Amino acid sequence: MLTASCYEHQPVIGYTADRLRDFSAALIESLLSTCERVHAWVVLPNHYHVLLTTLELKRTLSNLGRFHGRTSFQWNGEEAKRGRQVWCNTVDRAMRSEAHFWATMNYIHHNPVRHGYVSKWQDWPFSSAREYLESVGETTAADTWRNFPLKDYGAGWDEPSL
């Protein structure tokens, strides 16, 4: 899983709904150029998560770094904020088991609910949740949710440091 956040959790990605939409599409396109598969993703106004398979993590992270540089330059120009730091960091986390993979899938799709943007995860338009639901069906999605609960998964990840 890759996670990246905007500097100081500022909602730079979510400056407009169009930016969220365009960034989501460009992110997945960029990742697919170096990854074997993107399993799940979500983009929120100030961060994103992607569950993917890559055989070349360093190449994928390098590609992502260039992508972040391009988006920073573009957005800072659009907002007349040249020199502003947009991205804070990208963190990668290897999946340790099948259970970890499915709990991560649930975490990613549930993230907009966790942050209060929607009440049902499939209602967030900047995510793979709808596509996932269409591909596996409601019964399988519900079973996956029950079998791989979030519990305290991700606790403390999205809160700013004090």
Image: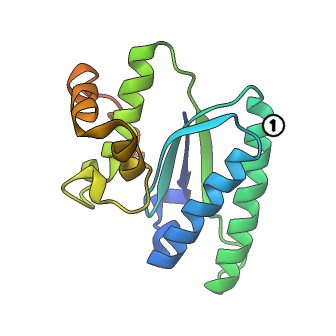
Using the rendered image of the protein, determine whether residue 160 is visible from the camera's viewpoint: no
Q: Residue at x 43, y 54 (%)?
A: 127
> In the displayed structure, does residue 153 sit left or right of residue 143?
right
Residue 137 lies left or right of residue 20; in this view the side is left
Residue sitting at x 24%, y 20%: 147
Residue that extends furthest to the top in the rendered view of this protein: 97
Residue 96: x, y in percent?
Answer: 50, 14
Near mark 1 (Cα within 10 A), the count class, few <14, some 14-19 or many ≥20, is few
- When the figure is inspected, residue 60 is found, relative to residue 73, above or below; the finding is above
Look at mark 1 in the image and give the residue it sits on. 59
Residue 59 in percent (x, y) is at 81, 37
Q: How many marks?
A: 1
**In terms of depth relative to the viewer, which is nearer, 29 or 10?**
29
- Tell me: residue 11, above or below residue 155: below
Foreground residue, 65 or 144? 144
Q: Quadrant of residue 67?
A: bottom right
Where on the picture, by quarter, is residue 140? Answer: top left
Instruction: Say which quadrant the N terminus sits in.
Output: top right
Rendered view: 84 above or below 140: below
Q: Position of residue 19 (x, y in %)?
A: 54, 74
Choose between 97 and 5: the one closer to the eye: 97
Q: Residue 38, how many percent across, how many down?
A: 58, 40
The quarter of the displayed image where residue 37 is located: top right
Identify the residue at horizontal 21%, vertical 53% (top origin): 120
Residue located at (62% from left, 46% from top): 89
Say which amino acid is labelled 1. Arg
